[in-house]
Image (spheres, coloured by chain):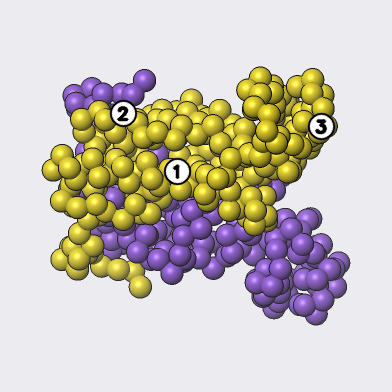
Chain colours: A yellow, B purple
Amino acid sequence: MSKPKQAGGRPRDGRVDHAIAAAVRSLLGEQSYATLTVDAVAARAGISKATIYRRYATKQEMIFAVLLHDLNEAPPADTGSLRGDITALTTRIGDQLARSAAGVMAGLLADIHADEALSARFTDSYLAVERSVITTLLDRAVARGELPHRPDPALVHALLLGPLFAWQIMLNEDPTRTTLLADAVARSVTNALTSGALTNPAGIEKASVRQSH
Amino acid sequence: MSKPKQAGGRPRDGRVDHAIAAAVRSLLGEQSYATLTVDAVAARAGISKATIYRRYATKQEMIFAVLLHDLNEAPPADTGSLRGDITALTTRIGDQLARSAAGVMAGLLADIHADEALSARFTDSYLAVERSVITTLLDRAVARGELPHRPDPALVHALLLGPLFAWQIMLNEDPTRTTLLADAVARSVTNALTSGALTNPAGIEKASVRQSH
């Protein structure tokens, strides 16, 4: 439902998709997100602008599709443990993010906030897919007996995805350390989940925490 | 060093700063980050554009100063425990983020990536301050004997800040749940730190984790 539009009737030409994706990635390595144009992508890909616009309504839709729509929608293979499964997921997301320049992701996020159609596509085709994968991993852990019940997927989503995004688009940290971070995030969140620190909010009351306000 | 510039010699007029900040916040509640102008801020604040430009070179610098430069630079008071200290910090950051519209933070981040001067100011006056506060909290925990040694502050920074930012500018989750999230982040990260899950990277080898690639 949220797939890029196809030219009526004709089968989708994968070579064109590939040429567009390669041109977008190559141009974003040379110039900023803001200055990239559909004209330049068409020229680099050796296709017409009309061919691009048959697929994507805007430049933003095109970049979004290239950078985020190649998301692997399948949950990682069952590794036999929650920590293994979560590590596979955070490693995959970290690798995906590390392939894009930080400024590109920041520019795309700003445009997503400014454009309702793009925002809806982002929610439906990226966030919802990731949320569904996370839910699958949590349900597997419940079935294995690693977790007593499924924790709030929204919370787990933020805990897993947030540090990887912050590392890249806020903290401007070394992208070669993304694998280390992906592992640290997986260890931290798995530990919190299996120890009950997150699945038992009532535990807040019992712990000797003095709130600051 | 990274403070906004002051008019030569004259003492800084706090009322003007306050009027600018109030105008920026009020206008950003009515319109988008992209459409906000220095003209509109001057009109709303009842001051001249020149007065604003004596303080900030650009609109982005002005918005940055209003939204992020009022960061409380002091570490939270010592609560007696790492978890209490970290909860105080994540709650403060969560409250600060919840005061801004998600699109404003996304737009500002995109401009920070596109502007070297703003990027340097962001690093020096926002990220470095937060990193320093986190280092203080970790050192307190080491002094208390809660941690055997200080973990990598960059890693802890990403783990604490990331979920709060993702909640607001990526996941578009309910901002009224930010307090819940701030607490969950604090519990998760404290648990990971005190259990040694993060301070013992060599432990990766011993755990029964099968990597996905």
What kind of element bears circle 3? Answer: helix
Label 2 Cα neighbours within 10 Å, binned few <14 / some 14-19 / many ≥20: few
Residue B118 in view: no
Mark pair 2, 1: CA separation: 16 Å
Residue A207 in view: yes
Mark number for residue A77? 2
Give the quarter of the image for residue A32: top right
Mark number for residue A129? 1
Tell me which chain the residue with mark 3 is part of: A
Q: Is residue A76 left or right of residue B117?
A: left
Tell me which chain the residue with mark 1 is part of: A
Disc 3 and disc 1 in contact, CB within 8 angstroms? no
Q: Earlier in the sequence, mark 3 or mark 2?
A: 3
Mark number for residue A49? 3
Residue at position x 75%, y 22% from top? A45
Q: Please name the amino acid that badge 1 sits on.
A: Val
**Quick one: A52 or A177, which is closer to the camera?**
A52
Mark number for residue B87? none
Q: Earlier in the sequence, mark 3 or mark 1?
A: 3
